[in-house]
Amino acid sequence: MLKLEGINRIFNETTPDEKIALDNINLDLKTGDFVTVIGSNGAGKSTMMNMISGALSPDFGTVEIDRKNVTKYPEYKRSHLIGRVFQDPMAGTAPTMTVEENLAIAYSRNKRRGLRIGVDKKRREFFRESLESLHLNLENRLTAKVGLLSGGERQALSLLMATFTKPSILLLDEHTAALDPSRAELITNLTKQLVEKDNLTTLMVTHNMQQALDLGNRLIMMDKGQIILEVDPEAKKDLTIADLMDAFQRIRGEKLVSDRTLLSV
Amino acid sequence: MFTAIFGSVEQGIIYAIMALGVYLTFRVLDFPDLTVDGSFVTGAATAATLIVLGYHPALATAAATVAGFLAGCMTGILHTKAKINPLLSGILMMIALYSINLRIMGATTETAIGRPNVPLSNVDSLFTIFFGWWGNLGIDTAINNVLISIGIENVPKTWGTFFIMIIVTFAIKIIFDRFLKTEVGLAIRATGDNDKMIRSFSANTDTLIILGLGISNALVALSGALIAQYTKFADVSMGIGMIVIGLASVIIGEAILGTKTIVRTTLAVIVGAIIYRIVIAIALRVEFLDTGDMKLITALIVVVALILPKFFEKRKERARKAKRRAERTLTSEQEAKQLA
């Protein structure tokens, strides 16, 4: 479904700020896999997500989606196949447009946009039904401007918009990090519900180790641009936070404790 | 006075089409497009030249609109493909169009070299063709008789321009509103609102920006083509400051009618364009002001229109705070009394 092969990327090459962002990343996701990605700041998690979405391109290596080599595809072309939710609740929606207009934009993601009216009667009914599944009463605020919604509501809407067209890949980049704990939990539950409903192949970056353990069937840990640990579905079932800390220490020979502030336990 | 105001309303309705174009780039796409100064003349020059060369005014006007569309697309390509800053892309295109406009009008000469103006005094235009039909209806005399009976002596020669332009401009407004609600229209609006988001929903923002600029400048050129036929000439300098006039219309309209919905905002833009013309007409009746001062007045109008809403907002806010404070002191005094 998603295959990364030998992905390399160096930022600011030939300057004093040179940084190896991704160092020979290989990853293979099967249909229905839900992989959580953990690692400290600067480990390359977001860079990897951007390589998949096409926002950044690798120096070397290939990205394959649905057995198609999409390495050369620009971002907008890849997003036919990829649904994304960003960390910033502002990033995933258009604030001056209404809830239903935002949904209409998401709805035509994998279609050719034409001169059809974006929100007609039939679609509005469909949008209403889809919004009901969020249980946020958004189905009664179809014509409200999205800029007026709270961060949690916007993120729930972004999630719905990203999964609307059943994308081949769903990318979640710390999508609960900017929310307060109760809202974050709500979004986490929604994520579970929406991913399970359509059996979506998902890659989720998180700073929250507990969340990384609770969600998904596989887990990878990144550090300094490399994938240093891959946990398969069998082993992930009984994995604990202590296991992860130990694994990091064993592999890197240094304690993860120094990262406590970054990796909330 | 009445005829002066009437004339400015007529012009305002024609310029409103240009203002709608400016609204599309400045507000919807969030792209400050300065091509307008050039593309307005391109529209006027293309229409005037083709009419003088003997083509039907309707065809000439359509060709002018297409020319504006192409000019806008070029600005879009300079920005999206050559990665030139939006303001500079527009300025480059505007200055390039100056020469192109001279060449277009030059097509009316035998040597086909540049020419700074084309008069349309002795040829048919869309307006003269329309008047031929309108004059037989007798509406002009009917309205003017009413006006004379209520004591207005200086009546306009014809009401035809007024009525036909209201119909044309509102037809464009309705199509424009509807377009912004289509799938492509929604994508264009989202491009101005949050381009990262719309790219993640598989829209090519480059294409949308080019298309948006094309449509905007098509409207601007159409307005230029109609103004040339209305004033019976095209001139290479008639576009100077056009972008500021468009912006003034948008800002004045928005300040008066608000921006609650698209339908309302586009109406605001049209009303703004008419009000702008009336303000200019009144300003020019002030004794010590001259037509040459018009650009200065325009700049001042825009400055005032930008400052005033903020000023009122601040005053309202201060009044609200003062009121709230007074209420709070009052209740605390009452509580103190009750305690005593």
Image (cartoon, coloured by chain):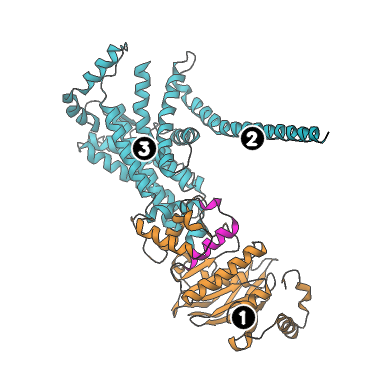
Chain colours: A orange, B cyan
Q: Residue visible at 48% across and 74% down?
A: A197
Q: CA distance from mark 1 to mark 2?
A: 52 Å
Q: Residue visible at 67% across and 84% down?
A: A239
| Position in image of residue A202 (x %, y %) | 53, 75
Q: Which residue is mark 3?
A: B17
Residue A57: image quadrant is: bottom right
Q: CA distance from mark 3 to mark 2?
A: 36 Å
Q: Read off the magenta span.
A: A145-165
Q: Secondary structure at mark 1?
A: strand
- Amino acid under disc 3: Ile
- Amino acid under disc 1: Leu
Q: CA distance from mark 1 to mark 3?
A: 58 Å
Q: For residue A219, which numbered disc appears in the image?
A: 1
Q: Secondary structure at mark 3?
A: helix
Q: Nearer the viewer, residue A171 or B19?
A: A171
* Residue depth check, mark 1 versus mark 3: number of the one nearer the observer: 1
- Amino acid under disc 2: Glu
Q: Is residue B235 visible?
A: no
**Compared with residue A12, is residue B18 higher up or lower down, i.e. above or below?**
above
Are there few (<14), some (14-19), or many (20+) residues within 10 Å of tag 1? many
Task: Using residue A183 as the reference point, say whether residue B294 is left or right of it.
Answer: left
Task: Using residue A203 as the reference point, say whether residue A117 is left or right of it.
Answer: left
* Residue depth check, mark 3 versus mark 2: number of the one nearer the observer: 2
Whether the residues at callouts 1 and 3 have beta carbons within 8 Å, the answer is no
Pointers 1 and 3 within a single chain? no
